[in-house]
Amino acid sequence: MARPKSDDKRNAILDSAIAVFARQGVWSTPTSAISKAAGVAEGTLFTYFATKDVLVNELYRRLKLEFADVLLAAFPRTEDVRSMFQHIWQRYIAWGVANPEKFKVMAQLSVSDQITAESKAVGYAPFTELERIASASIEQQQIADYPVEFIAAMLEGLAETTMQFVARRNSGDTYDYCAAGFEIFWKGISKS
Amino acid sequence: MARPKSDDKRNAILDSAIAVFARQGVWSTPTSAISKAAGVAEGTLFTYFATKDVLVNELYRRLKLEFADVLLAAFPRTEDVRSMFQHIWQRYIAWGVANPEKFKVMAQLSVSDQITAESKAVGYAPFTELERIASASIEQQQIADYPVEFIAAMLEGLAETTMQFVARRNSGDTYDYCAAGFEIFWKGISKS
Amino acid sequence: MARPKSDDKRNAILDSAIAVFARQGVWSTPTSAISKAAGVAEGTLFTYFATKDVLVNELYRRLKLEFADVLLAAFPRTEDVRSMFQHIWQRYIAWGVANPEKFKVMAQLSVSDQITAESKAVGYAPFTELERIASASIEQQQIADYPVEFIAAMLEGLAETTMQFVARRNSGDTYDYCAAGFEIFWKGISKS
Amino acid sequence: MARPKSDDKRNAILDSAIAVFARQGVWSTPTSAISKAAGVAEGTLFTYFATKDVLVNELYRRLKLEFADVLLAAFPRTEDVRSMFQHIWQRYIAWGVANPEKFKVMAQLSVSDQITAESKAVGYAPFTELERIASASIEQQQIADYPVEFIAAMLEGLAETTMQFVARRNSGDTYDYCAAGFEIFWKGISKS
DNA sequence: GATGAATGAGGATTCATTCAT
DNA sequence: AATGAATGAATCCTCATTCAT
């Protein structure tokens, strides 16, 4: 076989897509803008991703998975429930603040109709893993009796909001939204 | 005078936009699909909205404002803080469940780059009103000391998530997510 | 009969057409720009001129006829040939310099395909009149033996060019192009 | 490398533009008519010319430059002034008669507002060259004392008119307008 | 495999003209 | 007659995708 497809190129395309999508919005950026930013020819993009939809779905999965990795890395399985949730919380916020472009793109993709059910499932997989871990360690503990996925979703909603406050915070504001957000979440969730 | 511009037509266009945007996504639906659904000629759309961007911004404002109206209608200014928050909560969920299309479109528009800062400001105006009402009645009360906009944002994040659970709930599931969601929110927010 | 068509309005439209055509070019100005400039409704334009082509042809004729009027007014039929030509020459230049907009529009219309043969004929009619006058007084005179229409066309070509030099002339330049131009023409035309 | 941009295609587009512009007028022919006539896809036209305006300006330059080339080829720098002018004159007429389409298009473009000042400058450049040549050889000669550019413009105006007579001449008419025209020009210009 | 020119369906918008008021 | 909203064909241009080199 001649030159094999290069992972470098594939990654360059995906990374450029993030950058350029964040700047102009996912649905108003042509594939040519992506390939240009990636330093490859327009046609080359299509040897790595059959269609724009495929690229977009792939990107969605990658972002979700990378994000999950961050949340799950060094997950404190042996500590108490609060520590586990706090671990997730802090990494969630930290990642979002550190990667505003990725976050913005993820948000746009999440509400888009071009993301297939399968992609959503794949992107959600590691979070079920998370749910299971949490679920198991919750049972005999001090968490109120809500459906686990509901708790997970609540955490996500709250964390996303918190993240935006942290990111948006301008120089004067030193309020610790991260801590405050988690406090609210934990009070809401834990057994009276 | 000639035929005056008709509010009916204007509304038909906006309503059709919601329907068709919800089905195909905001950025993949051509203006022709909107005008067709509204029963007007392609050109007519442009006598009411100079460009697609203008239409989209107008739609965003309208949705936000209608939504705010619903939340604020019959707002119980004289009752206790919990009642006020619960009022908002319930109407939030109810509206979202009753208007899934509007909700979906609002979500797509909210993360889009085509919505101008001005539109966002206009759409947010009634919520500051809400914040002020809440803020005033909070001071001497039993709410923990978080920035008001932060509380408001938390409510929004939580309510949106809850709404999705209520909407998604299939026949077998009778769990009362609405109540559960509010419980979590209130425990999180209220003074120890 | 109800309100009769108003010549004022008709003229306003034609005059506005000249102004706006001169500024933006004949073929890139929409009829709406003309009606707006004329202070009438878009539709009104079409009660005076069935189509844009009709308006444009009408305008062409009017300009040509007005121009001819200027050239022929006080035509010195009894004087010598040179005086007659000089009369035309001077008025030609003077009119062009005084009416740059009309001149520009006439130039654009003259080379356009939308001007019908009939319009061209109508626009040329008074010039044949001129030709006849000239022709008659030439016969027994000192003009070289060229076809009259050829002489007429030569005069036109030369005068148009001269006019542009006069119009373009900027403050420092005091050269009398008008006189020079006629000198050239007359030397070229007159018998050795 | 991929398929390189082909000069053939570029020329085909330009040539087709001339043909189709001559038939329907510059501003009433859609770009699709040009691409069709050139045997390329509609989109292809835009890989060679970013916009219709660019195409039109390019075309103007090309026509002007080609025309200048014809006038200047084999220019008799060493002969007398009359020969030089006659050389230009004859080639002018000959080119116009041989290329009526190009001539017509050039006339339309010349009075159009879409031709940029830069294009006009570029198109005029070789004629200044001509002016300089003429100017130099005029000084010690038998030409009357008119500004050179004025003489040049006069020649152009006269030649264009003459050309139209030659082109328009129908079967019966055998009059030698070319010679007559030059005679007029030369008499007008040369020292008494 | 890489390149970028070629393709042509599709899209937002314009505009001459019509027609309800 | 006057108005200006309504119409929809037509236009320029974009862009995902294909294909010759």
Image (spheres, coloured by chain):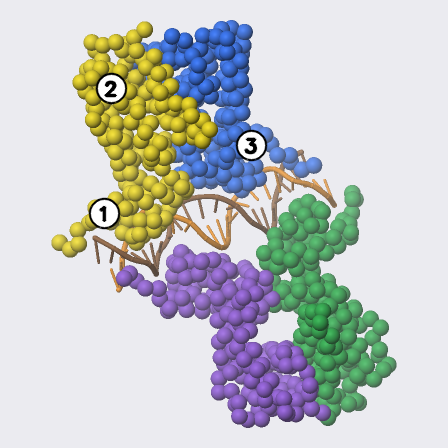
Chain colours: A green, B purple, C yellow, D blue, E orange, F brown
Q: Residue at x 29, y 43 (%)?
A: C14
> In the orientation shown, which residue stands out farthest toward the left?
C1
Q: Which mark is residue D10?
A: 3
Q: CA distance from mark 3 to mark 2?
A: 52 Å
Q: Residue at x 24, y 25 (%)?
A: C127
| Coordinates of residue A76 in the picture (x, y in percent) | 84, 78
Q: Where on the picture, by quarter, is residue B37?
A: bottom left
Camera-nearest label, 2 or 1 = 2
Residue D16 vertical placement versus D143 (above, below):
below
Q: How many residues crowd around disc 1 within 10 Å: few (fewer than 14), some, or many (20 or more)?
A: few
| Coordinates of residue C102 in the picture (x, y in percent) | 33, 36
Labels 3, 2: one chain: no
Q: Which mark is residue C84?
A: 2
Q: CA distance from mark 2 to mark 1?
A: 35 Å
Q: Residue at x 27, y 62 (%)?
A: B1
- Residue that badge 1 annotates: C8
Q: How many residues crowd around disc 3 within 10 Å: few (fewer than 14), some, or many (20 or more)?
A: some
Chain for disc number 3? D
> In the orientation shown, which residue stands out farthest toward the right?
A78
Q: Secondary structure at mark 3?
A: helix
| Coordinates of residue A7 in the picture (x, y in percent) | 78, 52
- For the residue marked with disc 1, what is the amino acid? Asp
| Coordinates of residue A101 in the picture (x, y in percent) | 69, 62
Camera-nearest label, 3 or 2 = 2
Quadrant occupied by the C terminus of chain A = bottom right
Of residue A112 and residue C170, the one placed in the foreground of this image is: C170
Residue D66 vertical placement versus C4 (above, below):
above
Locate residue B49 relative to residue C47 in the image: left or right: right
